[in-house]
Amino acid sequence: MSRSSSRTTATFSRPIVYADPVKTALDIVVDIPLAELEEDPYPSYVWMRAECPVAYVPETGRVWIATWDLCQEAGVNDAVFGPSSQASEDAYGAGNLMTLTGPEHRVIRNAAYAPVRPRAVKEYYESGIRATAQRYLRDVRGRGAADATLEIFEPIAQRVVGDVLGFDEVDDETLGRWFHALGELYVDYGRDPGVAENGRAVKAEIRAYLEHRLPRLLVEPDNTALSRLMHDGMPDGRVRSAGEILPTVNVLIVGGFQEPAHLVASTLYGLLTNPEQLQQALSDPAAWSRPAIEEGLRWLPPFGMTEKRTTQDVPVGGVLIPAGTEIALVIGSANRDPKRFDRPDEFDIDRGDQGNMAFGFGSHFCIGHQLTRALGEVVLAETLETLPNLRLDPERAPAVRGWTIRAPKPLPVCWDA
């Protein structure tokens, strides 16, 4: 038997269905349609933080944890909140960086981390990041208008990160096609057979590229992620095959391309919708780009949740979560928790760095956070300096959608050419 109640927070309300008795978090059910989450999850976040910060959301197949404190409590507890394999393996393949644990995870993580360590990023900060950003921005400056996300920020991120990964031979169009196919597969939840088929085709294409590229890296290893994944941690005379590294390569394509591109887009959107803050950033783009990027990470994190799976029964927020439960640590909600942040829904580059959860937790904390921050800082500053009188396009409205991955797509802007 179950009972239902409907509580109201501000103007938003939703029924909570409780089992009788409530034994675990799976007995507290909040039905939020995926279409509603894709449109705008933030009203649900406000309500859940206040009314049921730990609850099962059936359409996502996960127990949500919605507040800063509870996400922090769970996120640092690697022993109990281990990686989930469900959505990640469906999208990227079994045995990828996000699902591995223990010594095998450490070896693969260290290999993928090598080209994005702080010292490595510093070495190509000017020649790789800034030079690429300037080149792409020069190419679009004469146009006077563009979709900033799709036509400026994604191509820059794909080129910079693609070169770091080892895709320097792959053209921009192909990198973009790979990225979008895998990204759509990750957020689709199996709803669209066409998305699944396109994802399978792209994974086969990437594998074919790896099988073509790896023989050369066998005799001429370098510091790209492809080379390091192939060689690092292997006994003498042995290397990993294309099939073995493919799942992690797929993860790096989506995370590596998406995070910096959508971070800059969301940050710019925050500035363009706050004229005083835009003018503040324009007064000294080099000085203000980093605070703006940090606020962008908090306000619209590129990934809105991180997936976990409990390894044993664990109480969280006064509710028992059983072993084997799929969990969503809802970063997008935690990053706007009013118990942590004053005026949390406002974009404010004067906020100061109070930390954020945009890059995840524990042993699976994002390996590319240094590169993402560096890319975001440089690309935002160069964009503000290169495109005069940058503004939202009055003829085309931006659209901010998504909950697992949320960003302004499209972000139509114009400037004085």
Image (cartoon, rainbow, N blue to C red):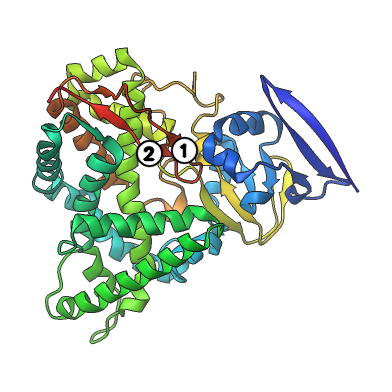
One can see residue 244 in this view = yes
Residue 300 position, x and y percent, is 42, 34
Most foreground residue, 104 or 226: 226
Lower sequence index among marks 1 and 2: 1
- Disc 1 versus disc 2: distance between alpha carbons? 7 Å
Most foreground residue, 272 or 9: 272
Res 42 quadrant in image: top right
Q: On the rendered structure, is 18 left or right of 91?
A: right
Q: Secondary structure at mark 2?
A: loop
User: Compared to 229, does 12 lie above or below?
Assistant: above
One can see residue 367 in this view = no
Residue 15 position, x and y percent, is 76, 35
| The disc label shown at residue 401, or none | 1
Residue 36 position, x and y percent, is 59, 38
Q: Secondary structure at mark 1?
A: strand
The crowding category of the residue bearing disc 1, from other C-alpha atoms within 10 Å (few below 14, some 14 to 19, many at least 20), is some
At horizontal 45% and vertical 71% (from top left) the residue drawn is 95
Q: On the rendered structure, is 4 left or right of 236?
A: right
Q: Quadrant of the C terminus?
A: top left
Res 415 quadrant in image: top left
At horizontal 31% and vertical 52% (from top left) the residue drawn is 256
Marks 1 & 2, CB-CB < 8 Å contact? yes
| The disc label shown at residue 409, or none | 2
At horizontal 22% and vertical 40% (from top left) the residue drawn is 152
User: Compared to 8, does 372 lie above or below?
Assistant: below
Name the residue type under label 2.
Answer: Lys
The crowding category of the residue bearing disc 2, from other C-alpha atoms within 10 Å (few below 14, some 14 to 19, many at least 20), is some
Q: On the rendered structure, is 247 left or right of 43?
A: left
Res 302 quadrant in image: top left
Name the residue type under label 1.
Answer: Arg
Q: On the rendered structure, is 328 left or right of 4?
A: left
Most foreground residue, 309 or 301: 301
